[in-house]
Image: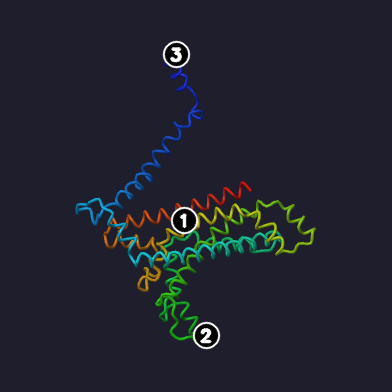
Amino acid sequence: MAQADALTAARRRPIEDRPLAWLAPLFLLLGALFLYPLFDVTRLSFTDATDAAAPAHYTFASYRSLLGSSEFLAMTRVTGIFVAASIAGQLVFGLLIAALVCEGERRRLPGAALVRAVVLVGWVLPGVVIGIIWKLLLDESGAGIMAYAASLLGARNPIFLSAPVPALFWVTIANVWRGTAFSMIMQYAGMKTVPIELYEAATVDGAGPLQRFRYVTLPSLRGILLINLVLITIATLNTFDMVLPLTGGGPGRATEVVALYIYHLVFSDFQFGRGAAVAVVLMAIGLVLSACYAHILQRERAA
């Protein structure tokens, strides 16, 4: 009788006091849309599946061939260069634009809102559209905008995407342009939380604009910068939608990042097992980097 009364009282409690009741739909949605696909991709990575009709066998062959593959090691190197350069560019340019916008607002200069709007264009456009736009810019024929501008300056047969090094350079520049807006938004929001009294005290002590930026702004943004670093690293590791229309991974495989390699394996070559294995490896890299960043962030907060 006492147990029945306790159960009745528990049912009568407001839903705010029963977190499992109102979190259950969220857990079910996460399980259906995230956990189950993650489990299935991991399971598929231990098979030699090629298409839905052919029978699949459980094996470690995909991982063995992957880790011993020279093309995968080359793609890992390309991805490392692409990710490192993109992160550095997005952080630096995002920080500079955010600082300029904040300074313009402080001085009440016209155009600060316009600058924010222009920078946000690269963030709101889909990656495929950005790839097509940069493809039109970098077309090496007479129809290309950059090629035409170079011809006006006397340059003949400019090379943008037809050689490995320039192609990787311009793909990275396009990704920096795309991701700078997100970094600018985060760092701009962080700068707006810095107490104005700190800047006033630094000014009274004789600090100039660069000194205030170095000794007041940057230390106040350490947490935001680390979170920004985590998010743009994960986003850049998973980038393939922009690269696909821009270069398709070429010339050769000079710009084929790991995420694009997964796309080609699964949707072009129908090597589901091998593609899933590469996806699991890429996920493991992202988890390791996220764990490192989380450890650094926790240590920063504890300091």
Q: Dot 2 corresponds to which residue?
A: 153
Residue 187 located left or right of residue 26? right
- Percent of width and height locating residue 111: 64, 64
Category of crowding for the residue at label 3, using alpha-carbon neighbours closer than 10 angstroms: few (below 14), some (14–19), many (at least 20): few
Q: Secondary structure at mark 1?
A: helix
Q: Could you tell me which residue is drawn at 54 percent across and 50 percent down?
A: 295
Category of crowding for the residue at label 1, using alpha-carbon neighbours closer than 10 angstroms: few (below 14), some (14–19), many (at least 20): some
Q: Amino acid at mark 2?
A: Leu
- Percent of width and height locating residue 231: 50, 54
Q: Is residue 244 above or below residue 23?
A: below
* Mark toward the viewer: 1 or 2: 1
Q: Earlier in the sequence, mark 3 or mark 1?
A: 3
Residue 63 located left or right of residue 10? left
Q: Is residue 51 above or below residue 155?
A: above
Q: Cα distance, mark 2 to mark 3?
A: 90 Å
**Which of 157 and 39 lies nearest the eye of the viewer?**
39
- Percent of width and height locating residue 86: 50, 64
Q: Is residue 246 above or below residue 19?
A: below
Quadrant position of residue 73: bottom left
Residue 234: image tag: 1
* Mark toward the viewer: 2 or 3: 3
Q: Earlier in the sequence, mark 1 or mark 2?
A: 2
Q: Cα distance, mark 1 to mark 2?
A: 39 Å
Q: Dot 3 corresponds to which residue?
A: 2
Q: Is residue 248 above or below residue 63?
A: below
Q: Secondary structure at mark 3?
A: helix
**Which of 200 and 63 lies nearest the eye of the viewer?**
63
Q: Amino acid at mark 3?
A: Ala
Tell me which colouring the rendered structure shows.
rainbow
- Percent of width and height locating residue 154: 50, 87
Q: Amino acid at mark 1?
A: Ile
